[in-house]
């Protein structure tokens, strides 16, 4: 396993606000990551810090094993965010021509295919595009750059459901042929679940959870039953959240369940249901764990 990006003890404060708090994060090569966190969790600050737009107060950033010096940008990376509204007078194709200069793996044939997929006329000026269509320009750059490290900040914000689907499908198809490390920050949590292989959840500038989607699917459960039975069942397990109702208790747990757990649940009349990624996120945040 090679590491594409490693952030060590990264801290960034804005006056009294700690946007990143001693953050340690490692991204493996050739993996799609989902970066989740509620408003103000520190996602954009993290992406901006990696991309060199913000200087951390302390900590280190290594890209492909090489520590970035002061003011040094990662090599061959692409940072996609909604910034093209500032280029209203430019044509779409001009923006791409500019972006192509910075990306050694840029693929023009693919870029023209993407115009068709996303129904974009390359000769249109940015100001003539709807805001959703404008945010697709960045996504096209992210895809056509084929950068070994690609960071997307809210790539589907403002896109209709058809274009969101199309973006994720296109990304996965291209990733299958051209694997690279992709970090996607988003609030549309359940939409990222089938796309991301690994998930990072930020809260108050720290990593609350980082795990494989596969592992999450096998570990995130909601347990309901008689309070004493639930207390017994959850002993020694990672409980994210619990809540009493009448004589019963509901508990969100993060634990791989074994056959003996399932047997115990049946015997004690405890119900077990899998949690969606969104529900897991909610219980993690609500539980403050
Ligand atoms: N330029 C700034 N000046 C002061 N505080 C800032 C600045 N940028 C971010 N912050 C604060 O840092 C914290 C993290 O903000 P950040 O934008 O990184 O969060 P986020 O997870 O991207 O949120 P969102 O999902 O709402 O975009 C917040 O408390 C925010 O108010």
Image (cartoon, rainbow, N blue to C red):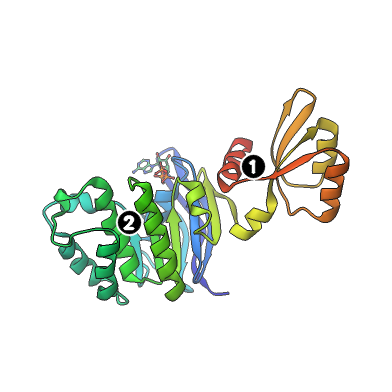
Image x and y of residue 196, in percent: 51, 59
* Count of number-bearing discs: 2
Q: Which mark is residue 53?
A: 2
Image x and y of residue 204, in percent: 51, 43
Residue sitting at the far top: 246
When the figure is inspected, residue 34 is found, relative to residue 109, above or below; the finding is: above
Query: Is 251 positioned to the left or the right of 8 in the image?
Result: right
Image x and y of residue 3, in percent: 52, 71
In which quadrant is the N terminus drawn?
A: bottom right
Mark sitting earlier along the chain (2/1): 2
Residue sitting at the far left: 89
Q: Camera-side residue: 240 or 45?
A: 240
User: Which residue is under mark 1?
Assistant: 289
Tell me the residue at 45%/45% (across/down): 187
Q: Secondary structure at mark 1?
A: loop
Q: Secondary structure at mark 2?
A: loop
Image x and y of residue 156, in percent: 37, 51
Q: Which mark is residue 111?
A: none
Q: Is residue 106 among what the camera can see?
A: yes
The crowding category of the residue bearing disc 2, from other C-alpha atoms within 10 Å (few below 14, some 14 to 19, many at least 20), is: few
The crowding category of the residue bearing disc 1, from other C-alpha atoms within 10 Å (few below 14, some 14 to 19, many at least 20), is: few
Tell me the residue at 24%/52% (across/down): 134
Q: From mark 2 to mark 1, how far is it between C-alphas? A: 31 Å
Q: Is mark 1 within 8 Å of ligand 1?
A: no
In which quadrant is the C terminus drawn?
A: top right
Q: Mark 2 and 1 residues: CB-CB less than 8 Å, in contact?
A: no
- The quarter holding residue 112 reads bottom left
Question: In which of the image's four quarters is ligand 1 placed?
Answer: top left
Q: Nearer the viewer, mark 2 or mark 1?
A: 1
């Amino acid at each position: 396993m090679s590491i594409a990006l490693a952030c060590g003890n990264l801290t960034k404060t804005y006056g009294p606000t700690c946007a990143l708090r001693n953050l340690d994060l490692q991204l493996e090569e050739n993996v799609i990551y989902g970066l989740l966190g509620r408003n103000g969790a520190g996602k954009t600050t993290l992406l901006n810090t990696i991309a060199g737009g913000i200087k951390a107060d302390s900590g280190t950033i290594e890209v492909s094993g090489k520590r970035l010096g002061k003011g040094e940008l990662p090599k061959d990376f692409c940072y996609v965010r909604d910034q093209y509204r500032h280029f209203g007078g430019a044509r779409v194709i001009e923006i791409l021509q500019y972006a192509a200069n910075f990306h050694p793996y840029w693929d023009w044939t693919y870029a023209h295919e993407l115009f068709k997929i996303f129904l974009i006329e390359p000769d249109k000026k940015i100001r003539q595009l709807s805001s959703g269509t404008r945010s697709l320009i960045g996504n096209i750059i992210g895809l056509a750059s084929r950068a070994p490290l690609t960071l997307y900040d809210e790539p589907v914000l403002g896109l209709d459901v058809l274009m969101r689907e199309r973006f994720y499908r296109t990304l996965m198809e291209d990733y299958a042929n051209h694997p690279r490390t992709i970090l996607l920050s988003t609030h549309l949590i359940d939409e990222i679940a089938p796309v991301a292989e690994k998930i990072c959840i930020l809260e108050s500038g720290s990593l609350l959870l980082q795990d494989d989607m596969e592992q999450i699917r096998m570990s995130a459960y909601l347990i309901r039953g008689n309070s004493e039975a639930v207390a017994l069942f959850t002993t020694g397990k990672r409980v994210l959240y619990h809540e009493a109702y009448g004589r019963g208790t509901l508990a969100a747990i993060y634990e791989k369940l074994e056959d003996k757990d399932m047997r115990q649940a049946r015997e004690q009349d405890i119900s077990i249901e899998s949690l969606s990624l969104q529900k897991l996120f909610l219980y993690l945040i609500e539980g403050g764990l």
